[in-house]
Every structure is written in structure tokens, then in C-alpha cells.
Amino acid sequence: MYISYAAIQFTTYRSITLLLHRIFGDRTIPKSVESFVAGAGAGATATASTYPLDLLRTRFAAQGTNRVYSSLRQAVSNIRRDEGAKGFFRGLGPGLAQIVPFMGLFFAIYEQLRLPLGKLDLPFGSGDATAGVVASVVAKTGVFPLDLVRKRIQVQGPTRESYVYKDIPRYDLGATKAIRMIVEREGVRGLYRGLTVSLFKAAPASAVTIWTYERVLGLLVGSTETKEA
């Protein structure tokens, strides 16, 4: 999932950025707006394209000792049989509602911080990584409630009571109703359950991804320029 997601995300981000340049030409739009639009589009495209894999990952992670699915093949077969094709996209709505502002904010903040931090004398040229960490923490915190709702909706369906967390509430009326139910039962803090752990994962992951992306992109561009010269 991550390999496919990253490939689609960065390809789409670059393509949308170039498309905006062609559309607006000399009428330059603010860099932050350009980054937000390109990031939001890239996030939406990558999420929709790889969503069935994301759903499978969440369901496998939610299994306990008594396994609901013994293999990936069985999981795909059972979901298709019991829930139909729509079952693979359960929770896609809140997933897109979360990823569009998340990736938009992430790339907008990252592009604003990348150049200033890049001028600092940081070890291993880690200005890119630092910008990625800040962007990830701010964006993730802002949209975390939708991410939490997405994961809870992903484990709905006929196997809901078979997971290790057997008290998962039933959400049948969409993301808005789910958010209302969480606030009523768990308070506003319930919308941020697991945020700290999520940030510990997202921040270093974003730092490594961005640092690697910039370095590989630089190598590819440099190689192309050398061949053309």
C-alpha cells in the first residue's frame, strides 16, 4: 500500500503543479495556494486508488488471537462475497474528507518551510526532513478526528464483533453521525484518541519520505542535466 500510495501521490503532485503552471502561465498564484491544491489533489488520487489496501491493513491490524482472516486472499474473497465491491471502499468518504485538507496543509506548510530551513546548517541537509516533521504534526493534528472515524468505519460490516475490540460501536449513518456519537459517548477528547501515537509514527515517516524524495529527485534531475550537457 505504501509503495503504491507514495508513487501515485508524488507523481500526481508533480503533474498538478505543472498543470497549474500551464493554466495560469505568467499569472502566478501564491505558492501556498498552488501547493495546497496540488497536495490535496495528490492525496485524494492516491487515497482513492489504494483504499482497498488501506481497509485490508486496518482489518488485519484489528484482529486478535482468533483471526477473522487467515490470509490476504481469503480476506479479499470474503469481503467480496459478504459485502460486495462497496465493502472494499467502506469509509472512503471520511477518508477523502481527511486526506484532502491533510495533504493540502502538509504540502503548503512544507513548501513554505523548505527553503528557509534548507539555508540552515543542519546535519545531513536535514532541513527538508525538519520541514516535513513540522508540516506533518500540524496537518495531522488538524484532521485527526476524520482519520479516527475512517478507521472505525473500516471495521464495520458483518465481521465487526469478531475483532479484538469487541465493543466497537455500530456506525451505519456515515461520518457525520459517527462524529456525533463519539462526542456524545466519549466527549471531544474521544475524537483525538490515539493522536500521540499517530504523531510518533507520522512525523518520522514524513521526515524520511520527504528527505528521500528530495534527494532522489535531485539525483535524477542532475543525471538528466548531465546527459543533456
Image (cartoon, rainbow, N blue to C red):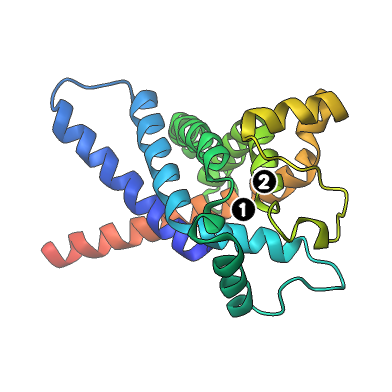
Q: Counting other residues with Cα less than 10 Å from the Cα at mark 1, is it few (<14), some (14-19), or many (20 or more)? A: some
| Front one among 224 and 175 | 175
29 relative to 57, above or below:
above
**Rendering coords of residue 108 (x, y %):** 45, 30
Q: Position of residue 216 (x, y in %)?
A: 39, 61
The residue type indicated by label 2 comes to Ile
Could one spot residue 214 in this view of the protein? no
Snapshot quadrant of residue 87: bottom right
Which residue is at 55% across, 48% downward?
126
Q: CA distance from mark 2 to mark 1?
A: 24 Å
In the figure, is residue 103 to the left or right of 220? right
User: What residue is at 33 percent from the left and 48 percent from the top?
Assistant: 12
Q: Residues within 10 Å of mark 2 (few under 14, many from 20)?
A: many
Is residue 20 in view from this perspective?
Answer: yes
Q: Which residue is mark 2?
A: 153
Q: At 45% across and 44% down in the image, what residue appears?
A: 43
Q: Nearer the viewer, residue 182 or 116?
A: 182
Labels 2, 1: front one: 2
Vertical placement of 182 versus 216: above or below?
A: above
Total numbered circles: 2
Whether residue 15 sits left or right of residue 217 in the image: it is left
Q: Amino acid at mark 1?
A: Ala
Which residue lies under the disc numbered 1? 205
Q: Nearer the viewer, residue 52 or 32?
A: 52
Determine the secondary structure under disc 1.
helix
Q: Earlier in the sequence, mark 2 or mark 1?
A: 2
Label drawn at residue 88: none
* Residue 108 appears left or right of 136: left
Rendered residue at 53%/60% (across/down): 52
Q: Secondary structure at mark 2?
A: helix
Q: Which x, y percent locates residue 98?
A: 56, 36
